[in-house]
Image (tube, helix red, strand yellow):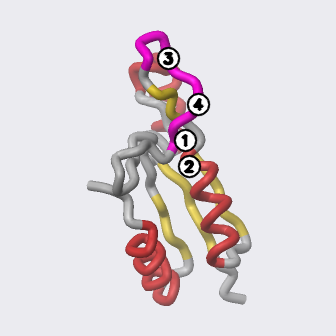
Amino acid sequence: MPFNQQKVLDEVRRILKREKFCLIVVAEGLVDADGNYLAADAATDAFGHARLGGLATLSARSSKAIFRLESARVATRPHPALGGPLRVKNGFRRGIHGRPGGCARRDRG
């Protein structure tokens, strides 16, 4: 399903009217209406595929500006198979394993 920025912005606005926090989860494979990757780099990998990355950081910066947020943080979580058993153990201990994406906070003062 292609990304629709206006629908996402409307939903985040609705949530921030009701809640203090909004968790936005993004995937590097996100595409626009024309099927272009939003996180595509000009570089390609060894197989000629577009190299993807940086979408979470871009989303956090955009969210902070659009919603005039106090902070917009990014927490990236690699697949457990890429990090080995120690990474998985530490992630569970900290309570962050399996929670990808960024977190935005609006100061309700």
Helix or strand or loop: what does disc 4 sit on? Answer: strand
Q: Are marks 2 and 1 in contact (CB under 8 Å)?
A: yes
- Residue to which mark 4 is pinned: 42
Of badges 1 and 3, the one in the foreground is 3
Report crowding for label 2: few under 14, some 14 to 19, many 20 or more residues within 10 A (C-alpha). many
Q: What kind of residue is marked 1?
A: Thr
Looking at the image, which is closer to me, 34 or 100? 34
- Residue to which mark 3 is pinned: 45
Report crowding for label 4: few under 14, some 14 to 19, many 20 or more residues within 10 A (C-alpha). few
Of badges 3 and 4, the one in the foreground is 4
| First of labels 1, 3 by sequence position | 3
Looking at the image, which is closer to me, 95 or 48? 48
Asked if residue 102 can be seen in this view, the reply is yes
Q: CA distance from mark 4 to mark 1?
A: 22 Å
Checking the image for residue 56, the label placed there is 2
Q: Residue furthest left?
A: 1
Q: Are marks 4 and 2 in contact (CB under 8 Å)?
A: no
Q: Are marks 4 and 1 in contact (CB under 8 Å)?
A: no
Helix or strand or loop: what does disc 1 sit on? Answer: loop
Looking at the image, which is closer to me, 83 or 51? 51
Checking the image for residue 76, the label placed there is 1
Q: Quick check: is 46 in the magenta stretch?
A: yes
| First of labels 4, 1 by sequence position | 4
Which residue is located at x 67 percent, y 68 percent? 64
Which residue is located at x 67 percent, y 59 percent? 61
| First of labels 4, 2 by sequence position | 4
> Which quarter shows the C terminus?
bottom right
Report crowding for label 3: few under 14, some 14 to 19, many 20 or more residues within 10 A (C-alpha). few
On screen, 16 above or below 46?
below
